[in-house]
Image: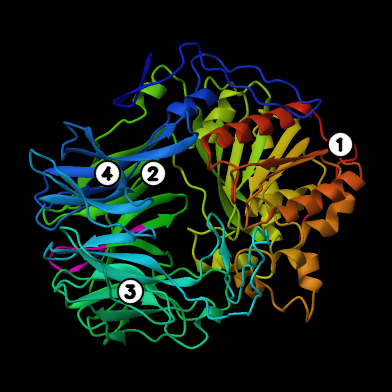
Amino acid sequence: MSVRIGRTTRAVLFSAPLCLSVLLPAGLAAQPSPPKDRLTIADYFNWEDVSTPTMSPDGRQIIYTRTWIDQLNDKRESSVWIMNADGTKNRVLVKGADAKWSPDGSRISYVAPGEPGGAQIWVRYMDAEGATTQITRLTEAPADVEWSPDGKSIGFGMLVRGTDTWKIAMPTPPRGAKWAEPPRVVTKVKYRADRQGFLEDGLRQLFTVPADGGTPSQVTSGDWAANGTTWMPDGKSFVFTSLRTADAEYAWRQSDIYKVDIATGAVSALTSRNGPDNSPVPSPDGRFIAYTGYDSTDATWKDAIMYVMDADGRNARALTEKLDRSPSGMIWASDASGVYFNVENEGSRNLHFVSLKGDIRQVTKGTHVLTVSDINRNFMAVGVATSPMKPNDIVTFDVRTPAIKQLTEVNADVLAGKQLATTEEVWYTSLDGQRIQGWIVKPAAFDAKKKYPLMLEIHGGPHSMYNVGFNFARQDHASNGFVMLYTNPRGSTGYGSAFGNAIKNAYPGKDYNDLMAGVDTVINRGFVDSNRLYVFGCSGGGVLTAWTVGHTDRFAAAASQCPVINWLSFVGTTDGSSWYYNFAKYPWDDPSEHLKRSPLMYVGSVKTPTMLMTGVNDLRTPIGQTEEFYEALKIRKVPTAMIRFNNEWHGTSSTPSNFIRTQLYLRSWFDKYQAPPKGQRVTPNQQ
């Protein structure tokens, strides 16, 4: 049997209909299947994604990464695809990702598994023969792979392991002895990271390797990491981000931009601001460098500003100070007259341009999430776009007359004959008159005269932004009869620095009221069953979910995913020390703020049945946080269940089958509870 996926056909090893089953906790109900013309959870296995399209130097072809799900091995795989600039002749090229054109367009580099194991840099010739060559045999994974301007070398970053200098005089073990493994010696401030585990002793450094293959040459060295592999146009140096100061590992939101001479390894600092400077991008003529940053602040959120400086670091000046939004994906105009960049604003993302005089104009408009990744000298842009009813696909347009043209439909086969949920934007007034943006997702064939159960979905971060992009999870919930509400409460990005910083030393706080006002707004529309209100969220959303059930009984059930429950125990066990700086005082000096902001302190008021879901490998919000809440709820005999996800770090959905389990456990838990606990109580936060 074969299954057609997008424009690919893959053999599968089953001939019977695909059947999904999940073992549910005792008492949880099985869920009815949605109508046949709706998106189903099984469709997720056939779902594909696209990213990072790039045009060939002559503008005739586009390469991009296409991701699909390997059902047999329960993981996502990536391939490099190529098509003509008009979208025709779309086909797979090689297995791998992170593909880049050589400056003359005769080759591409990409990263794929190779010998002796792990990720390696490969080069494919783009002639009729199409020969591929593995040009590295690295013991560590390469990152930020970039061609030199003359196409003779490739730059990349890689971990350089440190040397163990702490030696102890252990006695020689007797023959046949089975002693314990040596201990892991930890001396750094940041010694582990989510999705990586314990960090190897070492630092990321920059390298070059001949584009035809050979021995890599290390360019940077010292006791500091080097981030980013950006060539200057003359090919003689890299610009990168680092912090080459004493006690750099203790710095909070501090970085500078440096230049390193590739031949000699000599490093010079281009910025020295008290604050972060990042993402250097040289102009095509090599005269200027654009970058982002801001002056040091104790605000929990500050939108970055784009700056430009001379190539030697002089004459730095702000270009987007008045925009009050963070630039990303900066691309110089081919004539070096200014910089194109992506901007997130009120749930959408569009392309902007700023001249060297600081004149800003919006290039594209629309309710969509557009991520431009390349613009050529003929003014043609290529990127990825998505909107509420359209998944990610490759698009192109002329930046002078931006009429967006969609080139791919990688999920057209999955969506064929399917009725999708619709998404309605809503603005409403919360505490203090604050205006909040949200979106209501309504099932296909929605009938305003009916009463629907409502799911409130809360985003994490807390400094992040829900957007208008296609969301498979919400479509799946809507296919099963739920109305959904997702919002950007205060603290969210995309609304300016003041809005993002509004939760400083007050999270959770008034953002809770923003969420409840959104629920009231939807209820007042008349199509929601007020007895069947449900709330869930992961990470920061898990925090606010746990906070919500400690402050109101209005929800019939809740699911707190990968939450923080106790800030006192969290700040020293998460994968980094930066959370210490998100409180006015250290907990050993004054723990009152940590306690006041901890959902654990309000568990005595919880009546809502609350399920917990966390990855067992989570280092961002360690599972001990979940265990604290679970034990507290159990001792109070509040209905609860703890779902411990295997093969997951932070979150519960990175493994394809776990995404499906997350969806099914959520609905099964919610379907079990059809009414809120008795004695409804709503307590607004006035802080």
Q: Are marks 3 and 2 in contact (CB under 8 Å)?
A: no
Q: Earlier in the sequence, mark 3 or mark 1?
A: 3
Q: Given this view, does label 3 or label 2 mark the residue nearer the observer?
A: 3
Q: Residue at x 60, y 68 (%)?
A: 576
Quadrant in which the C terminus is drawn: bottom right
Give the percent coordinates (x, y) of residue 344.
42, 56
Separation of marks 4 and 3 at Cα, in angstroms: 25 Å
Residue highlighted by disc 2: 368
Occupied quadrant, residue 322: bottom left
Separation of marks 4 and 1 at Cα, in angstroms: 51 Å
Occupied quadrant, residue 566: bottom right
Q: Amino acid at mark 4?
A: Tyr
Q: Given this view, does label 2 or label 4 mark the residue nearer the observer?
A: 4
| SS state under label 3 | strand
Q: Earlier in the sequence, mark 4 or mark 3?
A: 4
Quadrant in which the N terminus is drawn: top left
Separation of marks 1 and 2 at Cα, in angstroms: 39 Å
Q: Amino acid at mark 3?
A: Phe
Give the percent coordinates (x, y) of residue 332.
22, 65
Q: Is residue 551 visible?
A: no
Q: Is residue 168 above or below residue 528?
A: below
Residue 677: numbered disc: 1
Q: Are marks 2 and 4 in contact (CB under 8 Å)?
A: no
| SS state under label 1 | loop
Residue 64: numbered disc: 4
Left or right: where does residue 635 sit relative to residue 441? right
Q: Earlier in the sequence, mark 1 or mark 2?
A: 2
Question: What's the magenta region?
Answer: 331-342
Residue highlighted by disc 3: 240
Separation of marks 2 and 4 at Cα, in angstroms: 20 Å
Occupied quadrant, residue 412: top left
